Image: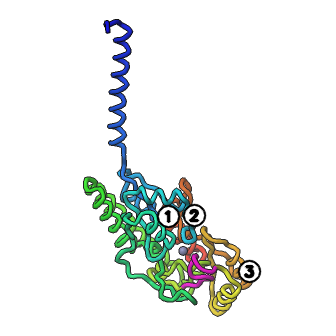
Amino acid sequence: MRFNFRNGMVIAVVCIIIVLGLLSVQEAREDEQLKVVATYSIIHDLVENVAGDRVELNSMVPIGEEPEEYEPLPEDMQAVAEADLVFANGLGMEHWLVSIIQNVAPNQNMVEVTAGVEPFYLYDAGLQGEPDPHAWLDPILVRDYYIPNIRDALIELDPEGEEYYQQRAVDYQEELGELDEWIKEQVEQIPVENKILVTSEGAYRYFVEAYGFEEGFIWQINSHEEGTPQQIANLIDSIRDQEVKAVFVETSVSHRPMERVAEEVGVPIGGVLYSDSTDEPGSENDNYLSMMEHNVSSIVEALGGRE
Ligand SMILES: [Zn+2]
């Protein structure tokens, strides 16, 4: 073939395309991040605080939604199968995850971030002996178990990021310690006889034990019967016997059963608390620290801590 200008141009263009192609393949490889899945919003936020931007992190249960009655979608199974690591709360919280792992990804690397926590056990009718999964509502357990478990699993997955994860974990643990100190100061403003936390779901056991409250609830856990007439009648009886200043509803469950209790007994609804999920991304309480501050401020205000 005789060289001419036109052929030269074609060859040059083809070469450029090949070089660009190779560059973009290389770039894609460099960009390819480790894929990490967290089961729901609270775990997602805690993992994000340690993992930063070194991994691609997704939440299975959409952020802001209730995780205990979640019904996984086909894309969740794919996400679990493709993930390098799955973080779950454990303690029976993600009962729906067990069959996904068994069926879709039996070799999946799953870390239960509550490993090492000494759990409380449920005690309501039919639930005795099951662990109470809501350990994140005590920030000291988050500091001492959740974060170290998350940090260690990330380091094992991505040893090059060790220093990065260590530093982020230390920084966040410091914030959790400060949160705990702040909560202690706040709840001191509540007269002891008012320290009764009545909520729809009995999700706050770890919180009430840590900060010296009594608890009351309509049902003990969202994954079982919620708000039956008998459960409502039982709570009404028990709060009639005590001087309860206010009752609370939660963001992730129906407010109606507690509104019936409040009307019947003549106590106000003291506020809307977060329990099983943070708020939607971009809203004020879209992270664990803010949701805890919101809860505590609402509780202190309603139970008579402030002038
Ligand atoms: Zn719950």
Sequence-wise, the earlier of marks 2 and 1 is 1
Q: Quadrant of residue 226?
A: bottom right
First to last magenta residue range: 215-225
Q: Which residue has dot 1 on it? A: 40
Q: What is the number of the mark on residue 263?
A: 3
Q: Nearer the viewer, mark 2 or mark 3?
A: 2
What amino acid is at disc 1?
Tyr
- Looking at the picture, how far across and down is residue 133, in whole percent? 47, 77
What amino acid is at disc 2?
Glu
Residue 18 vs 216, above or below: the answer is: above
Q: What is the number of the mark on residue 74?
A: none
- Looking at the picture, how far across and down is residue 129, in whole percent? 47, 88
Left or right placement of residue 102 versus residue 23 in this view: right
The answer to whether any part of residue 278 appears in the image is yes
**How packed is label 1: few (under 14 Cα within 10 Å), some, or many (20 or more)?**
many
**Residue 95 colored in magenta in the image:** no
Q: Which residue has dot 2 on it? A: 65
**Residue 216 colored in magenta in the image:** yes
Q: Residue at x 39, y 73 (%)?
A: 114
The yes-or-no answer for disc 2 within 8 Å of ligand 1 is no
For ligand 1, the image quadrant comes to: bottom right
Residues at badges 2 and 1 in contact (C-beta under 8 Å)?
A: yes
Look at the numbered disc 2 and give the secondary structure of its residue: loop
Residue 225 vs 168, above or below: the answer is: below
Sequence-wise, the earlier of marks 2 and 3 is 2
